[in-house]
Structure formats: C-alpha cells, structure tokens
Image: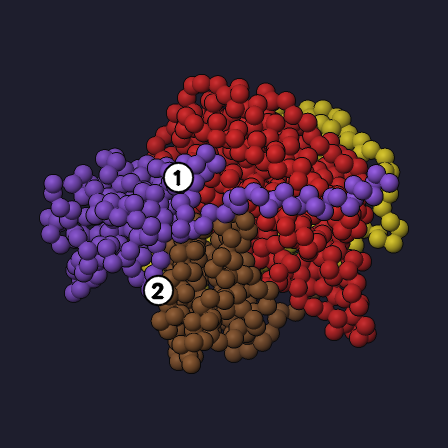
C-alpha cells in the first residue's frame, strides 16, 4: 500500500500563495554540487543543460542538494543498457523553474545485479518511473513501495527492454510473424537464434 | 424469418464503444457532426451485451486481446467484427513488437478488414455499407464461423495468453 | 470485496464509455465514494522504445507520431530536435515557422477534442458534436499540408518534409476565422451552464507546491497559477520571435484546468496568425544525408516540447551508426495519469471518475507507449 | 426584471441553428470538401501505391526504406528475371518513404485510400500502373489488383495484369 500525500480531509487552499522557484544559476549549481560531492564530474553541455556524473551511493546526496537549490521538477529517469560495458546507466533529469535549466544526474550500476536505492523519498514522481524501469529492465529499487506488475501482463521471459531480448524473433515464435524482406532489417537481430529468447 | 431479421438488423446496428487502439481517434469524427454515423442507423453502445458490431480500432496488445475476446464472447448473436486499420491484418506498424498480436483473424473471426493507417472516415462508412450488404445477403457469418471452429480460435488464444485454461475467467490480482 | 465487507472493488474499464482511450481503473468503493483507486495501464503497450532501437533514424520518424494519438506532431518535432542537437544541424527559419504552425494547429485540435471529452463526461453531448466537427477542419488542413489526416510524418530531422502549398496559409486563416466565430457559442454552451459549474468548480483541486512535487506539467500546472511554459522558458522552433501570453488560473480545480485549455486555444490562434504573417522565405529543410545512409554521431540529447497535455521529453542516446541506441520518451500523462490521478480520485464519487480523468486530459497511449 | 426576461429568452437562441445548413459530409452521396470547397484528398495524400514497371529498375531501395517491412522484392514470370516490389497493406503505414527513396520516381502513392476485403490475403499485391485506371474510383477493388501466389516455389501471377498495356 502506497501512502497518499494528498490530504483530502484538510481541503486545499489554492490561494495559499505563489510558488517561488529557486533562482540559482546553472553554472553555480554545478560548482556547488562539485563541492558537495567530491569526485562528481560536472559539465555544461549547452545553454540550459548541465550534467553531473556520480557514483550510485552519492546519487541521493546530489538529488537532495539539487532539490534544495530549486531543481524541484523531477522530469524523468532514463535507464540505458550498455551490454558491452556490462553496465546500466541511470539518468535523472531535474528541471528548475527559476533557473530555467535542466541538470542530468548520470550514474552507472552493475548490469548483472542491477540495484540502486529509490529516489521516491526525495522526488515523488520517481515512483512510477522506477516501477516502469523495474519491469522493463529488471532493475531493483530497494525502498520503492510499488514495484508491482505495471504494463506487461502474463509476461514470462527476460525484461523486454534489455538489449539481449530480441523482439523480432520473439514475434516470429509467438505470433507467427513472417519476415518479408530480411535484407532491410538490422543484421544483428537475424543472427541470433530464437530459442534463447523465447 | 431469418431474412426479415437480417434486413432489420442491417438497418439498426449498435457499435460497441471500446477504443482498442489508436484508430479510435477517427471514431469521434465519425460519430459527431461532420460525418454523422447515425445516418446509417449506427450508434455507440456502452455494453457488449447489446452491441452488434465490434470495431477493432487498430493493433491489439496481448493484454487488450484478452479483454477483446471476453467482450466478444459477451456479445449476443448475430455479431460482426470489423478490423479497422492495417495492424489488424498483419501487424501493421508494430509488426516486430513483442506486445501486439499480428493477425486478429486468428483469435476472433473478422468479417471485414479495412486497410489504412489510419483509414479515413470514408473507408469506415464504406465498410459499414458493405457490412449491411453482407448482412442482407446472409454472408456476414463470422459469429457462426466462431462457433463452428471454436477449437481453432481457442487454441490460438491459449497459445498467446499462456495462462492455463482459466485465463478467460481470471482478472489478475493487483497489489 | 474488501476485508471488512464494507468496500467493494470494481473494475472500471477498459471497455467502459467513460474511459478516454484504452485504460482501466480498479476502484475500491464504499457506497458511491472511491476509497482507493489504482490505475491499470498497459492496454496500449506497443513497445515503442524497443522498436525504435530496431529501426533506422529516419524510419523512426514514421513510428513516433503514434505515441500520442490526439496530438501527434509534438513527437515528430521533439524526436527531430533531439537528433538535430546531436548532429549540430541548423534548421532553416522557414522550417521553424512551419513547425510552429503545425504544432499549434495540433494543439488546437487536441484541446477541442479534450473539451469535447469534458462535455461528454458531464453528459453534455452537444459539445463533443460541435468541437469534433470543428476539429475536422483542422484535420483537412493537415491533409493538404502533410498528406495524412491523423499521422502526418511531416516534421523530420533538418526541417520539414515539404513546403506549404501556396493557398494553404489562406485556408488556415479561414479555418481559424471559422473556429473563432464558433468559440462564443461553445462558451455559452459549456462554461455558462449550471451543470458545468456544479460538476467542475472545486473538483479535485491541488496547489502549486503539491503539483510540482508530483511532476504535474502543462495546462494542469498552469491551472494552479504557476506561469510556466516550455515555449517561453526553453524555447524551440520559432516561439522566441512570436508574441503570446501564458494563460493561468488560480484555483487548480477542474474548472481552472478547463479554462486554461480554453484560453490556450485563443493564444494558439494568435500564434498561428503571427507565424504565418512572419513566414520567412528560404529553404524548408537543411541539407542532410539521404535517409538510407542517415547516421548520427555518438552523443546524447534531451529535447523538450510543450504539448497540449504537458511536457514531452525525448532523451536520445546515439552510439553512432544507423540505429539509435536508446530513445526514452517522457510523456506528460506518465505523472498525472497514474500517481496523481490515483490520489485525486480518492474521496470523489464514482461518477466523477471520468470527469476528473477528462479534466486532467490523460492520454493513455503516452503512458503505455 | 431584465434578468428574468433575458433568462427566458436565452433558450430560444438555439432556434437560430434551425436555419443553418449542417456541415455534415454525407458520404458516399457527397464529395468530402475542405472549407473552401476544394475536394479532398488532394494529390499530396498518401494512399495506395502505383509502380510504373517500365521505369522500375528493381533496385530494392523502396524495400530498404520501408519502416514496416511491407515491401518485398519478388521475381515475377514474364519480366525477364527482374524483381518487382510487392506491397503488403497489412503492414504498410502510408509514410511515403518508399516514394522518397525511389531513384526513378516510379513508385508513387496515389490519393486512393479505401480498400477493404473480407479476407486478409488480397491485401498483398503488386502495385502496377494498372491501378491508375481506377484512380478516380471510390474504392480500390481487389478484383482488379495484381495478385501473386507461390506455386511450386515460383511466383505466379494469378489475377490481374502483370504488365501495363503499351500505348
């Protein structure tokens, strides 16, 4: 059971006052993060886009620090599978309404035992994103109260968004798909046999 | 007697209001003032028990297919299925997706397929005209085909759902 | 049945007339009151992000508009913008202006459909009859410009696919005049109705802090008074050169969400008129490699777009070569369609479920993808 | 007082819609027109393919460009071993990328849009210029399409004209 944060009994006071966003500069925010977490690589990609690279155990510290600086809009968390390098990359995108800039917090986790602490206590929207990544990539988020069945139903087999899952061969096997023109397809999809992905 | 019933049912059909896929976005224009489906005596119906036409609007994911089969079996005879969009014929845009079924005709009997991604309202209306013709002639016999070849359809459904024989009755328990 | 036999659990959808799209709820009811709601998405899952990894960069342009069916152009534009950022492509000004016109037309079409959906949810079936009829004129325009009624496949990396036909701007102005003439009768039909007041004022309100903490974006956030719009704050296409306002409302309830959408239709008409007036001449697409040899250098980029439902994000990662490595789509409904909706539904009657979903303008295809 | 009068009169304003012509397009008795009265779909519309076999060089670029794996290059009897694109409308998403990729511009998407059948098989056919003959018709009739079947490992045209008539 997930805790609700909206208290209907109290009733909302919509005219409670204006929302005041933080107005720190993007560059300054990155410098402060560099001081807060030694070893964090920071860079400005272009106007309004900053990047922070940290280790997984420092992730919470950085997210908390950025939230205090006004980066309070949790845009998304992206998971990227890098099978050759045996890692999974998680990218947290945070936007500040005052700074008008986005900071991407990148962190790498091990691909064989993918697990990283949840970001839900800091950013509530992460609850749904982590739920999806848990289902699609098989990443575990200890602390997330809602890692339940989400989009897929009756799914047997590996997490489908991982690179080693072959959707094409799976369709051939399960739905009787006929490939019409194999030459136009990515060759690496046709090489693999269907048996290990079924 | 059958002929009279066919003649009558061809002129008053209820379309099951189930937006199964992205083709459903062409339904509001069809129902509403610009094209006005009621000229044909076709209107939307909320419950499958009183509907005559099942318009499969586009691709079906496996999760939807289960509900589609359940809704289809709840419909009263005679019932007609229109496959709306290329994805009902052979997968369409999502031909290599692990989540969508390719040929809907393997799981429920389809009376008319409409090609297009998505088909224009003109195509939908033409399909309705053709369906009315077929009903009057007694050719739209998809529901009889379903009864006669139930084993074939059921085997195909079982193959996709992988849930044991009781998949049709169970709704998964959510945590 | 609940544990204490006081609550009943019902399955609401996916085959239900009050559901917009293919979507479902599990509602735990105590009498008529929703005690707990859980959203069941996934009926429209097509695995877009997986399919994009299997197709070439240009082939994906045909795939992305399917992610949001009522408002497809934002997807093409955001995907193209992300690729342009990685490749360092400069988009011609004319293409930017055409994109702006297309995006705003799409926004009007989507809002008209959304307002119609709200009307349908309170039993006012005249409104969807009218709005969907007007929306069809916009689809006619799209058909003349792009060759497709619903899925346009028109914006692509480097610009747009074709130039505008000569008489198209005139037709756009005519359609906009027609819609502007119709808007007052919509207003008196919908917003002056007592039923609308009774059903929508004070419906499922939230305040700005709560909304931001839960990732609510777009018109749903502006309904709480936060003056924020990606078109102004992180400008793309030609929005920097155009003069428009961001409509906001204070109360954050269902009525405010409807009114913000209503005002945005007027602003979009204003934007389109300006963009057509200032339309620069010149090329409509940059020089790009041919589609079959289209490669993108390694790198990643994040493109953000304000759609009619909220914020769209495309995070594109390239490893070099012909195929994308990863494309992550952040649809607006992913936050306000699941976690926020579940919390807002609690405490309301079951008959309000469809209306709350409609006022939030939840778009199931972009949740499921 | 004035308020009461206004409220009493208001419902009758709906009467003005009585005299207005409805904008319903009465398909199929009426042509679908845009706001200026021009017929739709226009030439830009992406509908069903035609392919001019006299120009086609069997390069297969249309099949390579197709995002839906809808086009297959097949060898047809009586064409001197040349391969021709066969389109499956169970896959086609009408994006028009095949038209863009075609170096000879012989592949073309017409504004024909309606095609329906009771059987999924006729949706796979060879686009020929013969389809142009019914370009202005309301519906593409599958009886006029060029259908191909595999018999003894060989593709044989079982219906329709394999070659256009020379003028």
Spot occupied by residue D29 in the image (x, y as percentages of width and height): 40, 51
The shade of chain D is: purple
**Earlier sequence position, callout 2 versus callout 1:** 1
Residue named by callout 1:
D39
In this figure, which residue is indicated by the disc labeled 2? D118
| SS at mark 1 in the image | loop
Chain painted in red in the figure: C
* Near-viewer residue (B132 or B164): B132
Where is residue C261? Give x, y as percent.
Answer: 67, 39
How many marks are shown on the rendered structure? 2
Horizontal relation, residue C250 to residue D146: left or right: right
Q: Colour of chain B?
A: brown
| Quadrant, the N terminus of chain A | bottom right
Q: Chain of mark 1?
A: D
Task: Check the image and report above or below for D2 versus C275.
Answer: below
Helix, strand or loop at label 2? It is loop
How far across and how far down the image is residue C71, in percent? 55, 42
Left/right of residue B89 with respect to residue C224 in the rendered view: left
Q: Nearer the viewer, mark 2 or mark 1?
A: 1
Q: Residue at x 19, y 55 (%)?
A: D160
Residue C336 placed where, x, y %? 68, 48
Going by the image, does D7 lie left or right of C293? right
Q: In front: A16, or A97? A: A16
Q: Is residue A84 rendered to the left or right of residue A60? A: left
Q: Is residue C300 visible?
A: no
The subunit letter for the residue under badge 2 reads D
Using the numbered discs, state the Cα–Cα distance from disc 2 to disc 1 in whole angstroms.
Answer: 29 Å
**Frontmost residue, A134 versus B148:** B148
Q: Is residue A65 above or below residue B34?
A: above
Q: Which chain is yellow?
A: A
């Amino acid at each position: 059971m997930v805790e609700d944060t909206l208290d209907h009994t109290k009733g909302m006071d919509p005219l409670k006052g204006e929302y005041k966003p933080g107005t720190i500069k993007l560059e300054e925010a990155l410098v402060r993060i560099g001081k807060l977490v030694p070893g964090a690589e920071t860079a400005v990609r272009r106007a309004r886009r900053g990047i922070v690279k940290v280790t997984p155990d420092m992730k919470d510290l950085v997210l908390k620090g950025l939230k205090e600086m006004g980066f309070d809009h949790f845009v998304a968390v992206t998971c990227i599978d890098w099978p050759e390098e045996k890692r999974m990359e998680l990218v947290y995108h945070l936007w500040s309404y005052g700074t008008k800039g986005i900071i991407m917090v990148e962190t790498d986790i091990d691909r064989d035992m993918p697990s990283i602490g949840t970001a839900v206590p800091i950013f509530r929207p992460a609850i749904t994103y982590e739920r999806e990544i848990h289902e699609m990539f098989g990443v575990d988020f200890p602390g997330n109260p809602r890692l339940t069945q989400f989009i897929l139903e009756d799914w047997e087999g590996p997490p489908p968004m991982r690179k080693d899952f072959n959707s094409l061969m799976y369709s051939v096997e399960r739905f009787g798909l006929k490939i019409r023109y194999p030459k136009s397809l990515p060759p690496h999809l046709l090489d693999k046999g269907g048996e290990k992905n079924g | 007697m059958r002929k009279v019933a066919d003649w009558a049912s061809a002129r008053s059909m209820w379309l099951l209001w189930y937006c199964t896929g992205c083709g459903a976005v062409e339904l509001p224009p069809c129902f509403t003032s610009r094209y006005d489906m009621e000229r044909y005596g076709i209107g939307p119906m909320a419950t499958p028990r009183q509907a005559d036409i099942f318009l499969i609007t586009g691709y079906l994911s496996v999760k939807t297919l289960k509900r589609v089969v359940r809704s289809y079996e709840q419909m009263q005879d005679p019932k007609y299925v229109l496959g709306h969009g290329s994805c009902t014929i052979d997968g369409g845009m999502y031909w290599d997706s692990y989540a969508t079924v390719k040929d809907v005709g393997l799981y429920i009997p389809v009376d008319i397929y409409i090609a297009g991604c998505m088909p224009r309202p003109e195509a939908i209306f033409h399909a309705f005209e053709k369906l009315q013709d077929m009903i009057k002639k007694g050719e739209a016999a998809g529901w009889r085909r379903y009864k006669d070849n139930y084993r074939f359809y059921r085997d195909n459904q079982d193959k996709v759902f992988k849930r044991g024989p009781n998949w049709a009755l169970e709704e998964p328990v959510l945590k | 049945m609940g544990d204490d036999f006081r609550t009943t659990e019902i399955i609401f959808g996916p085959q239900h007339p009050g559901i917009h799209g293919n979507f479902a709820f599990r509602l735990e009811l105590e009498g008529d009151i929703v005690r707990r709601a859980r959203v069941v998405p996934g009926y429209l899952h097509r695995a877009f992000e997986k399919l994009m990894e299997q197709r070439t960069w240009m082939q994906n342009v045909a795939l992305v508009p399917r992610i949001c069916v009522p408002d497809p152009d934002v997807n093409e534009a955001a995907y193209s913008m992300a690729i342009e950022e990685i490749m360092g492509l400069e988009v011609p000004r004319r293409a930017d202006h055409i994109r702006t016109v297309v995006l705003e037309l799409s926004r009007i079409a989507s809002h008209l459909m959304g307002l119609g959906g709200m009307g349908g949810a309170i039993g006012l079936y005249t409104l969807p009859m009218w709005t969907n009829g007007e929306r069809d004129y916009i689809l006619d325009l799209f058909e003349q410009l792009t060759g497709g009624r619903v899925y346009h496949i028109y914006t692509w990396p480097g610009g747009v696919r074709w130039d505008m036909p000569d008489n198209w701007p005139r037709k756009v102005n005519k359609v906009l005049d027609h819609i502007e003439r119709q808007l007052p009768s919509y207003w008196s039909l919908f917003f002056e109705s007592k039923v609308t007041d009774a059903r929508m004022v004070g419906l499922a309100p939230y305040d700005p802090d709560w909304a931001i903490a839960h990732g609510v974006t777009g018109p749903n956030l502006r309904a709480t008074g936060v003056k924020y719009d990606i078109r102004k704050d992180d400008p793309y296409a030609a929005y920097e050169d155009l003069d428009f306002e961001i409509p906001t409302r204070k109360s954050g309830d269902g009525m405010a969400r409807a009114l913000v959408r209503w005002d945005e239709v007027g602003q979009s008409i204003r934007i389109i008129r300006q963009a057509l007036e200032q339309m620069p001449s010149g090329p409509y697409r940059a020089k790009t490699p041919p589609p079959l040899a289209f490669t993108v250098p390694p790198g990643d980029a994040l493109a953000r777009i304000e759609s009619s439902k909220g914020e769209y994000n495309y995070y594109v990662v390239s490893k070099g070569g012909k195929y994308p490595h990863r494309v992550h789509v952040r649809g607006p409904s992913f936050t306000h369609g699941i976690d926020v909706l579940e919390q807002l539904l609690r405490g309301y009657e079951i008959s309000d479920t469809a209306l709350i979903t409609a006022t939030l303008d939840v778009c199931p295809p972009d949740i499921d993808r | 007082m004035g308020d009461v009068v206004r409220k009493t009169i208001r419902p009758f304003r709906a009467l003005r819609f009585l005299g207005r012509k409805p904008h319903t397009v009465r398909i199929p008795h009426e042509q679908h027109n845009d706001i200026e009265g021009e017929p739709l779909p226009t030439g830009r519309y992406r509908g069903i393919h035609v392919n001019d076999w006299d120009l086609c060089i069997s390069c297969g670029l249309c099949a390579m460009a197709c995002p839906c794996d809808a086009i297959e290059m097949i060898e047809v009897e009586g064409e001197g071993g040349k391969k021709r694109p066969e389109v499956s409308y169970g896959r086609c998403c009408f994006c028009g990328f095949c038209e863009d990729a075609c170096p000879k511009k012989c592949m073309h998407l017409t504004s024909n849009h309606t095609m329906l059948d009771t059987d999924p098989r006729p949706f796979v056919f060879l686009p020929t210029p013969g389809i142009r003959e019914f370009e202005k018709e309301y519906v593409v009739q599958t009886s006029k399409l060029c259908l191909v079947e595999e018999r003894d490992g060989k593709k044989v045209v079982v219906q329709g004209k394999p070659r256009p008539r020379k003028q």
